[in-house]
Image (cartoon, helix red, strand yellow):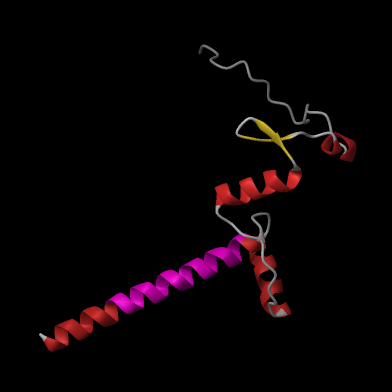
Amino acid sequence: MKRTSTTRKSGADEAPKLKASDFARAKFRVAGKQVERAEWQAAVRERIGKERITIMIDADVLAAYKVRAGARGYQTLINQALRNALLGDRIEAAIRKTIREELRG
């Protein structure tokens, strides 16, 4: 069988380890223009549509999400749970509206 890829499979990561000094020298760009870190962070947040907040969550609830999350990230699971709750509310409201209309008709 003909080999179609020349990519080596190696267990070791060949990229150099980055140090704090490497990140300190980083230049941030938005639309090709060099900007300050804060402006770059704002542009990233705007693009991904997320906002940083601080909330208080019961310790046992947070612990449960951290256990469920594993490598995926507990904040992602909490965000998805909140999104599902909103969707559930919309579905419930649509069903209630439909039932009311049917009972009237």
Q: Position of residue 69 (x, y in %)?
A: 64, 62
Total tally of numbered discs in the picture: 0
Quarter of the picture holding the C terminus: bottom left
Q: In which quarter of the view is residue 3 placed?
A: top right
In the rendered view, tell whether residue 80 sits above or below residue 2.
below
Q: Residue at x 22, y 78 (%)?
A: 98
Q: Of residues 83 and 35, which is closer to you in this image?
A: 35
Report if residue 82 lies within the magenta region.
yes
Q: Residue at x 40, y 76 (%)?
A: 89
Q: Of residues 39 and 82, which is closer to you in this image?
A: 39
In the rendered view, tell whether residue 1 sits above or below residue 93.
above
Q: Of residues 64 and 55, which is closer to you in this image?
A: 55
Q: Position of residue 23 (x, y in %)?
A: 82, 38
Left or right of residue 84, residue 39 in this image? right
Secondary structure mostly taken by the magenta-highlighted segment of the chain = helix
Q: Residue at x 68, y 25 (%)?
A: 9
Residue projecting furthest to the bottom = 104
Left or right of residue 62, residue 86 in this image? left
Residue projecting furthest to the left = 105
Numbered range of the magenta stretch: 76-94
Q: In which quarter of the view is residue 10 placed?
A: top right
Left or right of residue 20, residue 86 in this image? left
Left or right of residue 86, residue 44 in this image? right
Q: In which quarter of the view is residue 51 placed?
A: bottom right
Q: Position of residue 83 (x, y in %)?
A: 49, 66
Report if residue 93 lies within the magenta region.
yes
Residue projecting furthest to the top = 2
Q: Position of residue 100 (x, y in %)?
A: 21, 85
Q: Of residues 60 and 1, which is closer to you in this image?
A: 60
In the rendered view, tell whether residue 44 sits above or below residue 54.
above
